[in-house]
Image (cartoon, helix red, strand yellow):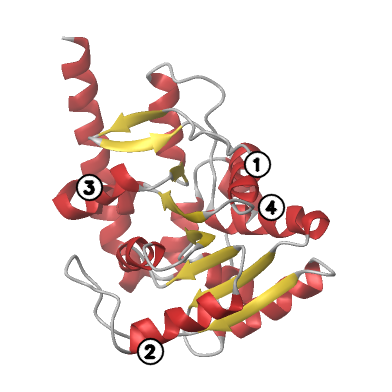
Amino acid sequence: MHEPPKPRQFPILGIPVSVVDLKRSADLVSRWARGRGAKTVFVREVASLMAAVDEPYLAALHQKADLVVPDGVPLVWTGRLRGVGSELGRVPGADLLDAVCQHSLSTGQSHYFFGGKPGVADEMAKRLAERHRGLAIAGTLSPPFRTIGPDFRMEGEALVELERIRQADPDFIWVGISSPKQEYWMMQAAEHLPRGVLIGVGAAFDFHSGAVRRAPRWMRNNGLEWAHRLSSEPRRLWRRYLVLAPRFVLAVALESIRRKS
């Protein structure tokens, strides 16, 4: 079967972002899952993009990823201001997960959920199966906490966990161990898997399991989801929204000025 090509990209602060929207992303990964070889999908918002800007090795992984979708509204606004066009739309990890699950009901494609605190992956799988009747779930695994950084290698206990996933032979491996840990893990895991699409969706595990309440749709549609998340978890997220977000705005403004000069 002919494999669909990767979509075109545009750079934000040197980090490539794919020109896709939710519908195209869901369709693309569903088609990729039918082919051979593992694919990797990064879901980017302001904080995780800035983390890549600050870490050269992480930035390099974005060049290797098969798809880098724009979760954060500021990334979409930046692209459109730079003339990328209406093909670019927001692709939240939680919405991508829902869309791909719904699409897979007609294809029979299966899902594996790797991540979350103990019990979270199981609860998420249960709720998704109730919402999408007939959803094929290949397995779940909430791994113990471990340090995962640029020097992470798939060995020992981590390799045993990956073997469980390989034996389950899922079409989609949803990874929720927080960014950038999940990106380091996915790029290593992809080298050991014969097929499947690995998608890092972070907070989607908490949203779909009910562990964390997601922002109302009107806030999500108007670029205000950050305010809801900050008010819900201020101690954990204050740096993300009060330090990294202003840095992003300033850096993008300066980059835009340089592009025009």
Residue drawn at (29%, 88%) of the image: 156
Q: Which mark is residue 144?
A: 2
**Separation of residues labelled 1 and 4 (CA atoms):** 23 Å
Q: Which mark is residue 60?
A: 3
Q: Amino acid at mark 1?
A: Met
**Callout 2 touching callout 1 (CB < 8 Å):** no
Please name whichever residue, 204 or 220, is drawn nearer the observer in this view of the structure.
204
Compared to residue 59, the image places residue 163 above or below, namely below
Q: Amino acid at mark 3?
A: Ala
| Label 3 crowd (10 A; few <14 / some 14-19 / many >=20) | some
Earlier residue among tags 2 and 3: 3
**Separation of residues labelled 2 and 3 (CA atoms):** 27 Å
| Label 4 crowd (10 A; few <14 / some 14-19 / many >=20) | some
Residue drawn at (82%, 55%) of the image: 106
- State the image coordinates of residue 95 (x, y, percent, origin top left): 62, 54
Which residue matches tag 1? 1
| Label 2 crowd (10 A; few <14 / some 14-19 / many >=20) | few
The local secondary structure at tag 3 comes to helix
158 left or right, relative to 114: left
Compared to residue 52, the image places residue 189 above or below, namely below
Which residue matches tag 4? 99
